[in-house]
Image (cartoon, helix red, strand yellow):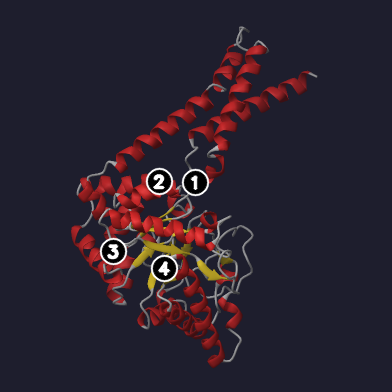
Amino acid sequence: MQILRRVGVILVWFAGLVFVFAAANKNDPYLIALRGSGNVVLTVTSLAAFAVLIRRGYWSRRRIAGKLLVLMWCLPSLAMLGAHVFFEVRKRNVLQTDTAQARSLGKHFLVGYSSFDEVATLAEKGLIAGIYITKHNANGKTAETLKAEIAALQDKRRAAGLPPLTVAADQEGGIVSHLSPPLASLPALSTLANLPPDIRAEKATEFGRIHGEGLASLGVTLNFAPVLDLRPELKRNRFDFNTLIGYRSISSDPATVSEIARAYIRGLEASGVGATVKHFPGLGRVRTDTHHFNADLDTPVEELEASDWRPFREVLAASKAQLMVGHVTLTTIDPDRAASHSKAVVDGIIRRKWNYQGVVITDDLVMGAIYQHNVCTAVVEALNAGVDLLLVAYDGAQFYRIFACASDAFGRGKLDPAMLHDSEARLNRAFPVD
């Protein structure tokens, strides 16, 4: 019985530490499920545990351990309050950014959102250039309802005298069809790879047209597709929970990927929707899921140029597609940082070697490969490398932290004016104001 009692006390200590950690980090993307009702449950549970410990005499006993245990169960509520206050202060500071600075930096951000009112405020103040629509925005809504919501945001934008918002979505087909429903669901482009060349090109164009018309009907202007990563030869990594590139890639043959992707983009662009090819420098050889972990790509550049990068170069040269750069580290070029914020990769390879002067966008900065490290450094380095758009998709609340990083760097003269000027020119070409 005494052993069970001790085990119980140890478990109460352990649970208390977990609660304190969760409360202090309640704004972390990994704890997004705790927000709202989850925070209430955590607070009520911690206060109930505190009351039970008091009732059982842990505070009145002479042992210091009992008093410490009681005090520890006070901490979750205090930690949560502190985290909430810190978040709200940072949010207020961002919302009070000088108008000129807000509009100067805001043109570099695309954000996901949960609250219409919150993102509407960001749009009206010019703190963002666009929004990212995903399945949680569409859940339970008809196409008409979602279209009206997007249109309302654009109306607020126009009323503020600002350019239209870029409205982006992930509608690749197959397992990544975030707006199906309400849009029609299509199979992955990989299902076309074994068709005769003339037929697969025709079908790919049709797929692009169907996606484009559906997205355009909602007010979406930019699709994060197609995927140009070559299909990996290795079996799926059991720790790959989200990337799943083996299911999303078109083919292991660069020529087939290029052909199908170009045809698909023609269909998209004919419908008035822009394409974004991804995820340079390629995930096909990477076994790590960058949603959660760092990933290194050790393959020599000459080999990548001849295979993995062929579709990127060919498709970018033959279309108006934008380029999404992933959070993979090209160890032979820049071993110290991911490609998404590497000047050696973005400016050195993409801009200078390839002479690509279109829009470059990062993969989601809320992914673990970036966010769980020094995200402020990544933001500053990305802008100074020539990246045009920073994507904050999975957890839009992280926008305030990420924008604050850029704003602070701007105020301290840490952002390269020449790079910002060139980026603004590219964005103006890509998104001209009517």
Picture residue at 50% right of the left edge, 71% below the top: 214
Circle 4/circle 3 CB separation < 8 Å:
no
Q: Quadrant of residue 310?
A: bottom left
Residue behind mark 2: 118
For disc 1, the neighbor class at 10 Å (few under 14, some 14 to 19, many from 20) is some
| Res 29 label | 1
Mark 3, residue position: 386
- Number of numbered discs overlaid on the protein picture: 4
Q: Nearer the viewer, mark 2 or mark 1?
A: 2
For discs 3 and 1, the disc positioned in front in the rendered view: 1
- Kind of residue sitting beneath label 2: Glu
Q: Earlier in the sequence, mark 2 or mark 4?
A: 2
For disc 4, the marked residue is 222
The Cα atoms of the two marked residues, 3 and 1, are separated by: 27 Å
The tag earlier along the polypeptide, 3 or 2, is: 2
- Mark 4, residues whose alpha carbon is within 10 Å: few (<14), some, or many (≥20)? many
220 and 232: which is toward the camera? 220
